[in-house]
Amino acid sequence: MSTLQRIGLVGGGVIGAGWAARFLLNGHDVVVFDPDPEIERKLGEVLANARRANAKLMSGLALPEGKLTIAGSIEEAVSDADFVQESLPEREDLKQQLLARMDAATRPEVVIASSTSGLLPSRLQRDMAHPERFVVGHPFNPVYLLPLVEICGGEKTARETKLAAAALYEQIGMRPLRVRKEIDGFIADRLLEAQWREALWLVHDGVATTEEIDDAIRFGAGLRWSFMGNFMIYRVAGGEAGMRHFLAQFGPALKLPWTKLVAPELSDELIDRVAEQSDDQAAGTSIRDLERLRDDCLVSVLGGLRARDYGAGAVVKAHEQRIIDQLAERDAATETSPDGLLVLYRGRVLPEWIDYNGHMTEGRYLQCFAEASDTLLRRIGVDGAYVAGGRSYFTVETHIMHAAEAKLDAPLEVRTQILRGGKKRLHVFHQLFGPDDLLLASAEQMLLHVDIKAQRAVAAEGDVRKALAALAEAHADLPRPKAVGRHVGADRD
Amino acid sequence: MSTLQRIGLVGGGVIGAGWAARFLLNGHDVVVFDPDPEIERKLGEVLANARRANAKLMSGLALPEGKLTIAGSIEEAVSDADFVQESLPEREDLKQQLLARMDAATRPEVVIASSTSGLLPSRLQRDMAHPERFVVGHPFNPVYLLPLVEICGGEKTARETKLAAAALYEQIGMRPLRVRKEIDGFIADRLLEAQWREALWLVHDGVATTEEIDDAIRFGAGLRWSFMGNFMIYRVAGGEAGMRHFLAQFGPALKLPWTKLVAPELSDELIDRVAEQSDDQAAGTSIRDLERLRDDCLVSVLGGLRARDYGAGAVVKAHEQRIIDQLAERDAATETSPDGLLVLYRGRVLPEWIDYNGHMTEGRYLQCFAEASDTLLRRIGVDGAYVAGGRSYFTVETHIMHAAEAKLDAPLEVRTQILRGGKKRLHVFHQLFGPDDLLLASAEQMLLHVDIKAQRAVAAEGDVRKALAALAEAHADLPRPKAVGRHVGADRD
């Protein structure tokens, strides 16, 4: 499941760069080709946004990032790839021609997927020598946050190709949706396009501005659509009588002239109107700021739904578990500092961690220490399965001593000494270091092994206890830090 | 602003009952008429759902509920009302006839609003003697959670009527959207209907099931629509080149056959298919359970967006502030707890504060305590100007003891005892309480008054020292908490 691959990406625009970020953040190496001379800067900007959003969404849980390479040609991007994703402009002739080139330059068993939002796979695969390994994998922007990917094969696509693509997408935290019938626009873009065409009519006819149309969605039905589609929403609205009742009640509205049902002409005048109203709506906010606002809102919405373990929240939760398990595998051999301590956390001071005093705010110190404790727990075998089995460690007590300030972007590292690893108690001493090995703070923590449901301390289970005992044994001869056992306000040396 | 009114509701179905709940929970008295013999039970069920959702969303902040009365006739429901809201079935002739009756039974200055989702106000007001006080106020289900309400007047509607309706809706936490041109379906339902008709086609043609269509929205674009509409989303996707670039890039897709662009015939066969697929999708979950799931997800999404103060989250935040102000007016909210401690922080466990153990993650405990310390500092005069002058308090040491877990949406309150307020040192003891006064954790903290530039402790300045001394003096006789002076791992009593 966690086999890391080399991904060849052809096209590095908004969608291609989003793919690059999602693959890299999930540990895969990525080789991108795009003729844009600014490709490196543009990829870097999307990747920075993605890192920021991912750190918030996954509360710091992160696999080591894959390696990003910029290729000089399509062939260079795909020739060594284990999986190819094409995100070129939506022109059928261009895609046909370049897909044939990718096909010729890649081992025949490698899957080649297209990000097209609506072109037919049977037509796109037409000129390929190995059309059976071609499939559509249509993602949504921002690719690094939205889980949906539509999978649609053409007439010549092999079943194994669809399965392989779905498996890889799932492994990077996405939610594949199999499209059974090959139609223009697949499923999602048919729905989006119907709404979009109607929205353009409303602007065209002067019924509403772009801002009013957006408000008509985001303050109403759009809130519901973040976790339930129309059919489920209407089923619930229909009440005890169910879906039949709902259709009987609102069926007649289908006869009413409530949509224009044709696409408006995209005249210069309509383009001007949309562009001007859109400028008014943005009120001078830059695209970069809007991107961050969008990502922050998505993180909050996904975080909220994760707590419900429903819809996209369930996808995020499952992916978080997948990452925890992968980290656990990797943590089996983590580093030790020169003085024999465990290195359990590495990060950087993010902009939103800075308080009105201009340095890292208090709560973030404990966040770093808590993440170090989490890493330690995974390392001794307290992984997703263990917690699902009803056992975990809870922190019962923490004593923090501040030594120096941490500024924006400062690198952070937590090194930890095991003071005691008993049947129930885990007593640790963390130190947080900044640039040039400057000690920023220390935290002495007592954790207790608990039965989650019974809410009481119980002895840790066999393998966990053994793993912990081994770590504690390795630290038995380390000197005891002076801060241990200290109470608040005691004289400092 | 907080003048409480008597609201007459005609129609107590899903929408009417939702209005009843929203008005009652915001302190207004409500009189409902509906010929359904089970109206009392049905209203009670919706109200129970609404109370539950509102308590979670508003973290227990609640105005005293208004009084609910069931009326025996339309006239009884509206005759003493200060505002009337009609939520009858969507039949123009029925609404015309009964609106005329309401008109005849109500003082002429009372606004009469209709919940119609798409019928034209000019036609609905046709038979009223006072058509100027008629307006459409179209809400969305569930009315007690979704903020959007479309306001649309007919030819004879007075401007004052629209303003009065908008003001009342805002006061109960909604987001009025003024519809400038009177068209069938207003704004929102034109967009919804276009998507709904296309969705029915996809089922009709066997392209996708109801569940697949729902998934195509809720794992993708639906997540974005909870805070930004298509125009803003596409502007961001267009990148630095803006909306014009986006239209140029995706304009050609408007020519593609990506929608059916007509409404399908609602044949018995299509009804059967939709109803059966909807049953499969619900997999036996009852409507009551689905309603609660929907409401919980909405609460999480709204709660997440409130943290961003954006979109519907900004509406909720402003409404929360309105309720806090109203409550403060009401009982001149004390800042001291019954046992004489300072109440320095009130909040709620947000979705992104939950960790893999399912409860509030460690770092957030210290965040709450740190915010309480910040409030304390502001109260003794350590404000922006003071910090800008080069002085501040820095936390040097913290000892946290955990006592219980905090779950999603739990209300939080920090109460604080000043142990010592000296020249340089500020020694405090915070306690964090959850629901039902449950102690979640305590934190003993030592703060030091510093010269920020010189990075050393200096004596606090005159007014700050005096303010702090006064607070410390008021706490001088409070018992010393047992946890003070404790070191990590000491035996608990």
Image (tube, coloured by chain):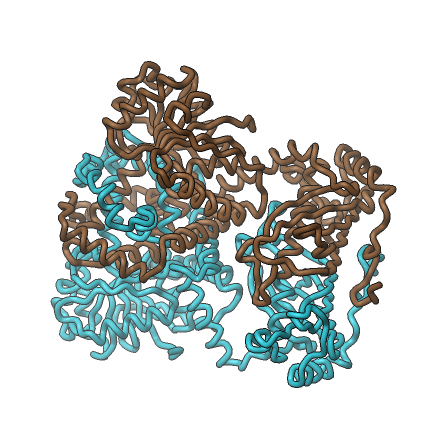
Chain colours: A brown, B cyan
Does B418 appear above or below B136? Answer: below
**For residue B232, side relative to residue A399 (left or right):** left
Does A30 appear above or below B48? Answer: above
Q: Which residue is drawn at 65% across and 31% down?
A: A329
For residue A475, what is the image quadrant?
A: top right
- For the C terminus of chain A, the quadrant is bottom right
Q: Nearer the viewer, residue B460 or B74?
A: B460
Q: Which of B157 and A320 is in front in this view?
A: A320
For residue B77, what is the image quadrant?
A: bottom left
Does B176 appear above or below A114? Answer: below
Residue A182 % position (x, y):
28, 26
Q: Give the number of callouts.
A: 0
Q: Residue at x 69, y 73 (%)?
A: B449
- For the N terminus of chain A, the quadrant is top right
Is any part of residue B265 visible from this angle? no
Q: Residue at x 62, y 56 (%)?
A: A364
Is any part of residue A381 visible from this angle? yes
Q: Which residue is drawn at 32% across and 57% down?
A: B140
Residue A180 % position (x, y):
33, 27
For residue A166, what is the image quadrant?
A: top left
Residue A174 % position (x, y):
45, 36
**For residue B39, side relative to residue A431 (left or right):** left
Residue A359 % position (x, y):
60, 62
Q: Nearer the viewer, residue B7 or A374?
A: A374
**For residue A16, side relative to residue A167 (left or right):** left
